[in-house]
Image (tube, rainbow, N blue to C red):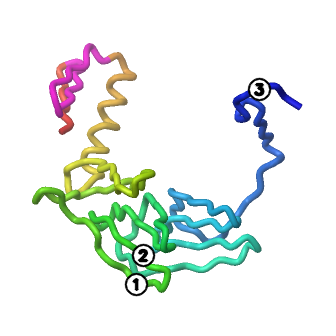
């Protein structure tokens, strides 16, 4: 028995302790685990997959798009889904009904909701990847900028919401 007051310090996990769970999932980026062993994962087929403790699974579609991402569960068993592909936050009810919860904040489109979180006071928090409607454009710029930086970039300039990367006369700005 340990005298530690922080049990996580005693936690150890070996590679041999891990097993595969689920099958035929597409881009299962977010996973929720319930205390009864049920897992929920975002599924790039436009929905969420429930994986039961016995290994059986059900796909719940109807979200639209192909990039449901972050998940949060509310008290009634509904899932809040950050739908990156459609640029909205949706509620997937236990009966499969889908409701759009959030598409804009103060009149500004949320464009690329990436993750959702419900805090202890049941407030919904979201992260938004970019203000661009097509998230892959800024990502391409960032990837090229990262490659330049690794190749000996001369400096990085930052000003408020714009980051500029400069190397050998090439500059890239990312809003």
Q: Is residue 126 above or below residue 88?
A: above
Residue placed under numbered mark 2 in the picture: 92
Q: Residue at x 70, y 77 (%)?
A: 56
- 111 in magenta: no
Q: Secondary structure at mark 1?
A: loop
x, y (%) of residue 29? 51, 57
Mark identifier at residue 4: 3
Of labels 1 and 3, the one closer to you: 3
Label pair 1/3, CB-CB below 8 angstroms: no
Residue 129 falls left or right of residue 49: left
Q: Considering only order in the chain, which callout, 2 or 3, is on the residue closer to the N terminus?
A: 3
Q: CA distance from mark 1 to mark 3?
A: 47 Å
- 166 in magenta: yes
Magenta part of the protein: which range? 153-168
Near-viewer residue (173 or 17): 17
Q: Residue at x 25, y 49 (%)?
A: 137
Q: Considering only order in the chain, which callout, 2 or 1, is on the residue closer to the N terminus?
A: 2
Number of numbered markers: 3
x, y (%) of residue 24? 61, 72
Q: CA distance from mark 1 to mark 2?
A: 6 Å
x, y (%) of residue 27? 51, 62
Label pair 1/2, CB-CB below 8 angstroms: yes
Q: Most extreme residue toward the top, as rendered?
A: 154
Q: Secondary structure at mark 3?
A: loop
How many other residues sit within 10 Å of disc 1, few (<14), some (14-19) or many (≥20)?
A: few
């Amino acid at each position: 028995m340990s005298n530690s007051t922080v049990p996580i310090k005693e936690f150890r996990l070996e590679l041999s302790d891990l097993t595969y769970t689920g099958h035929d999932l597409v881009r299962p980026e977010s996973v929720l685990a319930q205390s009864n062993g049920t897992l929920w994962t975002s599924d790039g087929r436009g929905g969420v997959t429930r994986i039961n403790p016995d290994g059986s699974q059900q796909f719940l579609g109807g979200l639209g798009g192909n990039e449901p991402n972050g998940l949060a569960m509310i008290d009634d068993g509904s899932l809040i889904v950050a739908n990156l592909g459609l640029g909205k936050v949706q509620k997937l009810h236990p009966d499969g009904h889908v409701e759009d919860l959030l598409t804009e904040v103060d009149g500004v489109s949320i464009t690329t909701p990436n993750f959702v979180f419900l805090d202890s006071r049941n407030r919904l928090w979201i992260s938004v990847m970019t203000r661009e409607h097509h998230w892959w454009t800024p990502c391409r710029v960032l990837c090229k900028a990262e490659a330049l930086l690794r190749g000996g970039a001369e400096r990085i300039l930052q000003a408020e919401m714009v980051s500029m990367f400069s190397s050998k006369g090439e500059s890239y700005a990312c809003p």
